[in-house]
Amino acid sequence: MSNIDTIPTNFGDLGLSAPILEALNDVGYETPSPIQAGTIPALLQGKDLLGQAQTGTGKRLPLRFPYCNVWMRLKRIHNYLFWRLLAN
């Protein structure tokens, strides 16, 4: 991101699902670092990216969110289909 004013200041503005936001809150994450704020939206959209930041800024954390979002979506679909089959 080239304009520092456009970087989101909280995880809720990044497009993360409610369960992920709740988990982040539970472990004490309040605001994303600049590398997290700049990469999470792109990763959730499936874009490739290359980022560089100082050690300890949370670079690995955003890499997990797309997988978590997909997994939760698949779990909801599985649960829906499971209960639909039981209802028939």
Image (cartoon, helix red, strand yellow):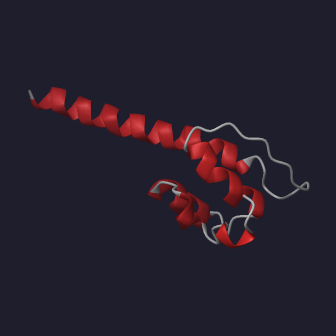
User: Eyeballing the image, is 88 above or below 72?
Assistant: above
Count of marks placed on residues: 0
**Quadrant containing the N terminus in the rendered view:** bottom right
* Quarter holding residue 43: top right
Q: Is residue 29 left or right of residue 15?
A: right
- Nearest the camera: 82 or 53? 53
* Quarter holding residue 33: bottom right
Which residue sits at x=76%, y=46%?
Answer: 60
Q: Is residue 61 visible?
A: yes
User: Eyeballing the image, is 69 above or below 32?
Assistant: above
Which residue sits at x=40%, y=34%?
Answer: 74
Q: Picture coordinates of residue 69 (x, y %)?
A: 50, 43
Q: Picture coordinates of residue 63 (x, y %)?
A: 68, 43
Q: Is residue 64 left or right of residue 13?
A: right
Q: Residue furthest left?
A: 88
Q: Is residue 65 visible?
A: no
User: Eyeballing the image, is 66 above or below 30?
Assistant: above
Q: Residue furthest right?
A: 54
Q: Picture coordinates of residue 82 (x, y %)?
A: 25, 30
Q: Residue furthest front?
A: 2
Which residue sits at x=51%, y=62%?
Answer: 22
**Quadrant containing the C terminus in the rendered view:** top left
Which residue sits at x=59%, y=52%?
Answer: 41
Q: Is residue 25 left or right of residue 58?
A: left
- Nearest the camera: 58 or 41? 41
Q: Is residue 81 left or right of residue 15?
A: left
